[in-house]
Amino acid sequence: MSLPAVTVGDELDGRTVTLTRADLVRYAGASGDLNPIHWNERTATAVGLPGVIAHGMLTMGLAAQFVADWAGDPAAVRSVTTRFTRPVVVPDDDAGATVTLGASVKAVDDDGAVTLAVTAHGPDGKAVLGKALAVVRAR
């Protein structure tokens, strides 16, 4: 497997993903993270949140899937690191909340490894992940 040919500074085509409350409930069940801030409005607002929020690891997982899809093979993704900068508030409606993903090529090593600076923005356009980096290597 070979990675797409890129050079430092190249921008990857972005993607927008929509999250609904149903997605949060499914993720809670799959991950075992049943914290009610991810599904119950009263609990979320009682602890000072603006509403029900997506799991941080779900948001990171969306970014990792974006990178894996670009690489063409999930096993090519060697690492994904990030900081969670702000939550994705998911309203209780059919529209949900969008997360817009993108990346730029930060480095291409002699061995073919590509380091991507990954971006993820919530519905308000503000970053929900910070300092997100992914390292991808051809297998």
Image (cartoon, rainbow, N blue to C red):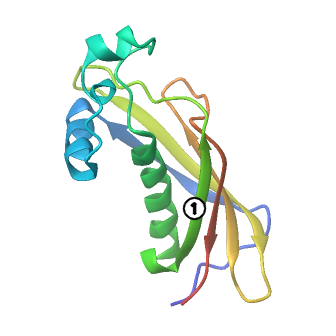
Question: Looking at this view, is 123 or 34 the one in front?
Answer: 34
**Percent position of residue 127, x then y:** 61, 34
> Is disc 1 surrounded by few (<14), some (14 to 19) or many (20+) residues within 10 Å?
some
- 26 over 79 or under it: above or below: above
**Percent position of residue 42, x then y:** 27, 11
Question: Looking at this view, is 97 or 59 the one in front?
Answer: 59
- 101 over 67 or under it: above or below: above
Q: Is residue 42 left or right of residue 3?
A: left
The residue where tag 1 is placed is 80
Q: Residue at x 46, y 38 (%)?
A: 99
Q: Is residue 127 visible?
A: yes
Q: Residue at x 52, y 64 (%)?
A: 67
Question: Looking at this view, is 46 or 116 the one in front?
Answer: 46
Give the tally of numbered discs. 1
- The kind of residue tagged 1 is Val
Q: Quadrant of residue 33?
A: top left
- 4 over 128 or under it: above or below: below
Q: Quadrant of residue 28?
A: top left
**Percent position of residue 75, x then y:** 45, 79
Which element is circle 1 on?
A: strand
Q: Is residue 73 visible?
A: no
Q: Quadrant of residue 126?
A: top right
Q: Residue at x 48, y 27 (%)?
A: 123
Q: Is residue 114 left or right of residue 43?
A: right
**Image quarter hosting the C terminus:** bottom right
Q: Is residue 90 left or right of residue 10?
A: left
Q: Residue at x 33, y 37 (%)?
A: 19
**Percent position of residue 95, x then y:** 28, 26
